Image (cartoon, rainbow, N blue to C red):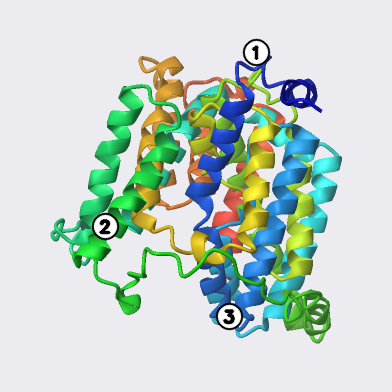
Amino acid sequence: MSGSTFESKVDQFFGYSARGSSFGTEVRAGLTTFATMAYILPVNMAILSQAGLDGGAVFMATALSAVLGTVLMALLARLPFALAPGMGLNAFFAFTVVLGMGKTPAFALAAVFTEGVVFIFLSLTGVRTALFNAIPKEIKQAVSAGIGLFIMFIGLQNCGFIVADKATLVAINPHLNSAAVALAIIGIGLTIVLYLRRVKGALLLGILGTWGLGMLAQAAGWYVVNPQAGHFSLFPGGVFSAPPSLAPTFGLFLNGFAEAFASGANFGQFLLVIMTFLYVDIFDTLGTLSGVATKANMLDKNGNLPGITGALSADAIATVAGAMLGTSTVTTFVESSAGVEEGGRTGLTAIVTAVCFFLAIFMFPVVGAIPAFATTCALFMVGIMMFEPLKDLEFNNPECLIPAVITVAFMVMGYSISAGLMWGVLAFILVKVAVGKPKEITPLIWSLGVIFLLKLFVLDTMA
């Protein structure tokens, strides 16, 4: 089969030409998405290892669940979004459920599995699609900008530019001449120049270029390897390696059900953990899909996302599979916006990302060597670009402005996409009631308001 015939058949299936993309653009976008979220492989392994799970098995479970979820996203929804075990949810798994509540990793995995089953039901019955469509337009616009600031903040934290401070909670690192921080700043500048010069693959080139500069800095002795400080060697310790065994975590979730039903107290805690996983995953996913799809102009004239049912089903099935393999909740990654910014518009972008995750199983020495300061440049630029949908926000209308600003602010200050969405919806309800327009609040939004209040005053107080 010739190259042109192959591309034609792929285009016929995914329809990237109709969405203003191309085969090369989709491939480049998929590589960019992977480069910005590859950190989840070593990071998830490190976090869940602290909960007592075998590190090698967690690495395998993370990679395989990312492959499965992302392929399902490509085939069921044909959208350019990638999935993997989510940050925040993995921390709740390890530090709250296992280390905080004293439960076993199997107990936590059983909760994740059950949550995923509930997710599948909600997705197939259209409940999650209805939730997505019910989100007001101004909040969808704000979610995009909020996600932009959120991932920019995460990127600057990861490279050490933003640090903790006792007086102000956070501050700019006073030691900007440290290698990792300085290289991140140089990488951001390089990426901005490439982007403004309209160089194709600017984000991916920024990551690779910054990584390359880091290797030169290590060779020159400026960047000093210090694992205790989180500064690992930037040179891969090889290219290929045998994948670790999945046996220590595969099917471990089954043991958790016996623990969950051992007593009434255990069962009550089991339900609480399930509800927490469910809440965060639902609204993180809805927020991510809304924000990234809005940025990519994928929403129809009614503000709905074609393929949303397939996307939510992929998320749910991947969560169930991830629990069976031995990892925390799988969710749609906000870093997908990096690939979207590179021009990715269809499931072909997701397929490329999934292939990269599969290859990473055998190339961990290379993937593990990509430093956080190198991916900061991409996250920073994507953060800026995610503000574009705000151009359509009615800034002179307080009814739109108040919920939108609260959504953006609380997403960053609450360090959570779901938190921004929650407070934005509550603000929307308050505003409409205050101006005497309660009829503009749909029954589903009222229901969301009740759910959010229960979460704040019941679920949170029980945790």
Element at badge 3? loop
Front of the two marks 2 and 3: 2
The residue mark sitting in front, 2 or 1, is 2
Tell me the residue at 62%/44% (across/down).
353
Using the image, determine if residue 169 lies above or below residue 348: below
Out of 457 and 315, give the one closest to the viewer: 315
Mark 2 element type: helix
Sequence-wise, which precedes: disc 2 or disc 1?
2
The mark lying in front, picked from 3 and 1, is: 3
Q: Position of residue 203 (x, y in %)?
A: 41, 37
| Disc 2 from disc 3: Cα separation | 36 Å
- Disc on res. 51: 3
Residue at (75% x, 54% y) in the render = 318
Residue denoted by label 2: 216
Q: Nearer the viewer, residue 122 or 298?
A: 298
- Could you classify mark 3 by the number of other residues whose Cα lies within 10 Å: few (under 14), some (14-19), or many (20 or more)? many
Q: What residue is drawn where x is 73% and y is 37%?
A: 74
Give the residue number, with chain letter if any, for mark 1: 301
Mark 1 element type: loop
Q: Residues within 10 Å of mark 1 (few under 14, many from 20)?
A: few
Residue 411 pos. (x, y %)? 44, 45
Which image quarter is the C terminus in? bottom right
- Residue 185 in sight: yes
Rounded to the nearest angstrom, the CA distance separating label 2 from label 1 is 50 Å
What's under tag 2, amino acid-wise?
A: Leu
**Residue 329 falls in image quadrant:** bottom right
Q: Is residue 292 left or right of residue 446?
A: left
Q: Position of residue 432 (x, y in %)?
A: 52, 25
Image-based side of 176 in relation to 239, left or right: left
